[in-house]
Image (tube, rainbow, N blue to C red):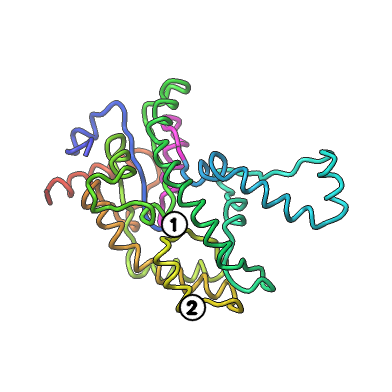
Amino acid sequence: MIYDTPDAWNQATAKRISLFGMSGLGKTHISQILRGSGDWFHFSIDYRIGTGYLGEHINDNLKRHAMRQPFLAQLLRTDSIYIGPNMTFENLSPLSTFLGQPGATSKGGLPFEEYARRQELHHRAEVNALLDTPHFIERAREIYGYDNFVCDTGGSICEVVDPDNPEDQVMATLAANTLPVWIEGTPDHVETLVARFAKAPKPMCYRPEFLNAKWETHGGDDVDPNEFATATYRDAITARHPRYAAMARNWGITVQAVDVATVRDASDVMALISEGIGKAARKA
């Protein structure tokens, strides 16, 4: 780890962390606190994916839908209007809408083959975005004068890395440039996350072998997209936990989601990370 003791962390003039874990457990909460302090650069992997790597695909998807409307189609053909996503850190809906859900097209679903194609596009984009981390660390320092840096990863990072492989390119890059920090939930968090997801299912990114197995079990051309998404999401939480744990064990540290929920300012975050480093050092 680039900070192997609490003192090394506390005394560092350039603090750099990568947050990972299930969506909804506090990655963006911490990132926003640090960004709001005025001393940290916030690098959102999902935002980078949506704007830097899948932007053209997202735009094309919007245009395909617009072309179904004769009025808009004529304006697009003559370059009379511009259609594009309004992507922000707080609103990543254009990316989610592009990924979609597999299932009955009559209920807004995508044919599974198309869904799988978009999953593969996201997979490659996520890897590339994560590998951009060193560039953005330097960019933040050189252009904006930020020495402190937080990489806010997507919940699907564990789907695109091999945490037990010491030569995994993504994890090696993150660990060489930042301190990977797992925000670990509890069984109570599982029920909370599933209940929240069921109210408003959102597209997810999964490993092909996991997705294919779930489609064989729960899927079909007539399946309700939201029902499939919710069933798959619950299974994904269970499947992802050991992968996150391996990432933390081999490459970084662990903090608890219940503790993350209590942080209110940057000094609270510094103390939380320091405590996590101390625990990891004692286990080593």
Label 2 neighbour load within 10 Å: few <14, some 14-19, many 20+: some
**SS class of the residue under badge 2?**
helix
Q: Nearer the viewer, residue 209 or 142?
A: 209
Which of the two discs, 1 and 2, sits closer to the camera? Answer: 2
Of 37 and 49, the residue lying toward us = 49
- Rate crowding at label 1 as few (under 14), some (14 to 19) or many (20 or more) other CA atoms within 10 Å: some
Residue drawn at x 56%, y 47% is 90
The front one of 108 and 20 is 108
Q: Give the extent of the magenta segment.
A: 23-43
Residue 33 at x, y percent in the picture: 44, 41
Q: Identify which residue is drawn at 23% across, 53% down.
A: 164
- For the image, the number of numbered tags is 2
| Residue at the image position 44 percent from the left and 57 percent from the top | 23
Three-letter amino acid code of the residue under disc 2:
His
The quadrant of the rendering that contains the N terminus is top left
Q: Which residue is mark 1?
A: 23
User: What residue is shown at x 44% (from left), y 61% (from top)?
Assistant: 206
